[in-house]
Image (cartoon, rainbow, N blue to C red):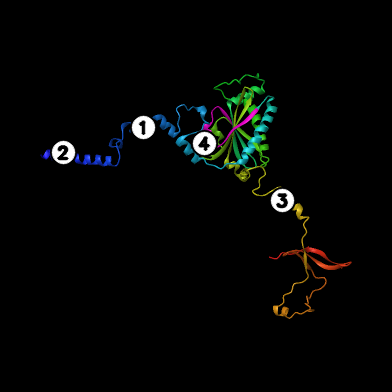
Amino acid sequence: MAEENKEQKNETPDKDWADMIQVRGENPQAAMPSADAADSKILNQEEIDSLFGYSGDDDEDDSYSMKTGVRAILNSSMVSYERLPMLDIVFDRLIRMMATSLRNFTQDNVEVSLDSIESMRFGEYIDSLTFPTLLAVFKAEEWDNYGLMSVDSSLVYSIVDVLLGGRRGTAAMRIEGRPYTTIELNLVKDMIELILSDLSTAFDPVTSVNFSYDRLETNPRFATISRLSNAVIVARLRIDMEDRGGKIDLMIPYATLEPVRDLLLQMFMGERYGRDTIWENHLMEELWETDVEIKAILKEKEISLGEIAKWDKGSFLPLEMNSNEDITLICGDVPLIKGTMGRKSEHIVIKVKDKAEKNG
């Protein structure tokens, strides 16, 4: 009997709980988590890699691809710099001038295009470079700071092949595992100086600046012009010469652009934050044709209100002044000039002596 009562006591709570669930319209079996539902919440390795922004088919050539997942969130929080609208216009002028200059330089059909303009950190940019790459350091003379231009190996060999009479329609021969020769470096240096001259001209509508060639490096350690954590702006250009060509990166630190930051923040060429030059010139021209009313003050004298109350028709106010004393001409409340009063023919005239002193 004791064992039967114990079994009934153990069954009662479970039975009552099941009845309560059925009364509320719920299914007891549905309330319990199933094994399939628990397994569906577990992420597999592919989903974990996607969440953290890693992909199994990533390679070194895909360094320009957009990052996703957690890495994209981290990078967006680390590098969030302001947009400089005038740089788009400057680089647009640059690619048009470069196309003409490089055609004259190579005597070949050259097309220049702007792939992208990105903001990143200097260390991240150095890590994204594919070697071998020539790194040209240039200086902004007026801004007293430096920039970096990288020329990839395919463009180096293409320029050498074109300038030394290579056959058209064939890709430039690339020899791996050897350093650049002196002839190759000198030919690329001439092209870099030409591009820097065009870059200086492209900045002329914004400000006058001269970009001068400083040195050419093959090791990024010797081309470090900024701290690895500093912000830079990178313009990626592509140069095509029929079946040959390559890429050029123009890297300018934000610290270099700081002296002209206000000019680069303009939304369009010639913007002056509310000032309109055409309206200013028109207003200046119309001011010379404007009629204004000028009053001549002979003398100022302080008198009491009681004396004014005694005035009657025909009363005189003695000014106590001589005929050669100065009088002041005013426009509104602004004193303009001083002079002496006289008579010419039937008119009273004033001979100008000097500018009047402004009150206060």
The residue lying furthest to the right in this view is 345
Q: Nearer the observer, disc 4 or disc 1?
A: 1
Q: Amino acid at mark 4?
A: Gly
Give the distance between the C-alpha atoms of the residues marked 4 and 2, in whole angstroms: 73 Å
Give the distance between the C-alpha atoms of the residues marked 3 and 1, in whole angstroms: 71 Å
Question: Decide: marks 3, 4 in contact (CB < 8 A)?
Answer: no
Residue 123 in percent (x, y) is at 52, 36
The residue lying furthest to the left in this view is 1
Q: Which mark is residue 128?
A: none
Residue 141 on the magenta span: no
Q: Give the residue drawn at x 76%, y 52%.
A: 285
- 348 horizontally vs 21: left or right: right
**Span colored in magenta:** 111-135
Question: Decide: marks 3, 2 in contact (CB < 8 A)?
Answer: no
Q: Earlier in the sequence, mark 3 or mark 2?
A: 2
Q: Earlier in the sequence, mark 3 or mark 1?
A: 1
How crowded is the residue under tag 3: few (<14 C-alpha within 10 Å), some, or many (20+)? few
Q: Amino acid at mark 1?
A: Ser
Residue 305 visible to the viewer: yes
Question: Which residue was labeled with disc 1?
Answer: 40
Q: Which mark is residue 7?
A: 2
- Compared with 178, 73 (above or below) is below
Residue 67 in percent (x, y) is at 49, 33
* Quadrant location, the N terminus: top left
Q: Amino acid at mark 3?
A: Glu
Q: Earlier in the sequence, mark 4 or mark 2?
A: 2
Residue 179 in percent (x, y) is at 57, 24
Residue 333 in percent (x, y) is at 72, 65
Q: Amino acid at mark 2?
A: Glu
Question: Which residue was labeled with disc 4?
Answer: 123
Nearer-the-camera pick, 292 or 70? 292
